[in-house]
Amino acid sequence: MEYVAGIDIGGTKCAVVLGRRAGNGEITILDKKAFPTGRRPYSEVLDEFFSTVEEILSAQGVKVSQVVAFGISCGGPLDSKRGVIMSPPNLPGWDDVPIVRLFEERFGVKTGVQNDANACALAEWQFGAGCGAQNMIFLTFGTGMGAGLILDGRLYSGTNDMAGEVGHMAMRPFGPVGYGKAGSFEGFCSGGGIAQLARSRAMEALQMGGGVGYCPDPASLDGITARSVAEAARQGDPAALEVYRTSGELLGEGLSILIDVLNPETIVIGSIFARAHDLLWPAAESVIRRQSLSYAREVCRVVPAGLGEQIGDYAALSVAVYTASQR
């Protein structure tokens, strides 16, 4: 019996996940323990990771020698080839941390690290909605907009791990700000971007002496979120429906570019798209039909992510599985 261990490093919380891999490749999650990251030196966080790994292995009666690989999922930037975490904005003080070497020295087990978009791409490719695809794109569509690319059956990370930064693409000269750029793909297609778009529409209505259903007065402006606008849209609020239609159209434009350039057979989209598929997809699909090449479009399906709230656990474990498969 083979085991894999997943290490999920986040800005607010961290987790260790232990999985058992069957002969057919399926993973059973045996145990998981989470703890707050905290504003502390990375060495202290690593010490807690090490002790948590040992605690879980002991509780499950698993020896370190039975673990075939550790997989680390962490926000970028990082260098997966060197195994180094390079100053992620949500992890202050984690500057050039040789995370792979530190884990391998501690446990003597092969270890790999990937940014969270790539890790989620591996998870959906191996165990989720992209299972069986040779060419798959995973889009986060959450707090931000990033992509993980599976091309010809392998994870593609680019020359220095910058492949997949689709959120930086300019879609309009002006618009919601995402990835530090107004009118970017992330600006229109992310939680923060949708909230910005909705806030802008609400302010316009308020300045005209009216309001919108999701924001009837100025005091409501700060409470606008992608989720609250989606709730209003499902209740028939015209302004909320327009916000999601706009985001859906820009999503369709971005997807058309990816379909034409990369010719994937599957595009898996997570988080907000999975929760608001009914609000986003009609407009996105209409744009894709108008703008993408028919031969590429006809072989590509666009689907919501399939792993739901467990995607973080499977993401780290998928990095471990992928690492174990590399020679």
Image (spheres, helix red, strand yellow):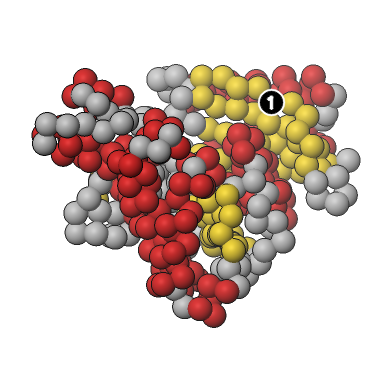
Residue 148 horizontal side relative to residue 172, left or right: right
In the picture, the quarter occupied by the N terminus is: top right
Tell me where residue 133 appears, x and y as whole percent: 67, 63
Relative to 83, residue 224 above or below? above
Q: Quadrant of the C terminus?
A: bottom right
Percent position (x, y) of residue 55? 72, 19
Q: Quadrant of residue 250?
A: bottom left
The kind of residue tagged 1 is Lys
Percent position of residue 67, x then y: 77, 38
**What residue appears at the point 55 percent right and 27 percent down from the top-left corner?**
14
- The one of 18 and 189 positioned closer to us in this rendering: 189
Badge 1 density bin: few <14, some 14–19, many ≥20, Cα 10 Å: some
Q: Residue at x 48, y 54 (%)?
A: 281
Could you tell me which residue is drawn at 78 percent across and 29 percent down?
A: 30
Depth check: give the residue in front, 298 or 314. 298
Q: Residue furthest bottom?
A: 295
Indicate whether 316 appears above or below 43: below
The vertical placement of 83 against 32, above or below, is below
Query: Depth check: 314 or 214 in front?
Result: 214
Q: From the viewer's perspective, is 22 left or right of 147?
A: right
Q: Secondary structure at mark 1?
A: strand
Please tell me which residue is depicted at 51% across the width and 19% down the height of the picture: 36
Q: Which residue is mark 1?
A: 32
Could you tell me how many numbered marks the image carries?
1
> Is residue 105 something one can see in this rendering?
no
Q: Is residue 11 visible?
A: yes
Q: Nearer the viewer, residue 145 or 5?
A: 145
Please identify the quarter of the rendering in which residue 231 is found: top left
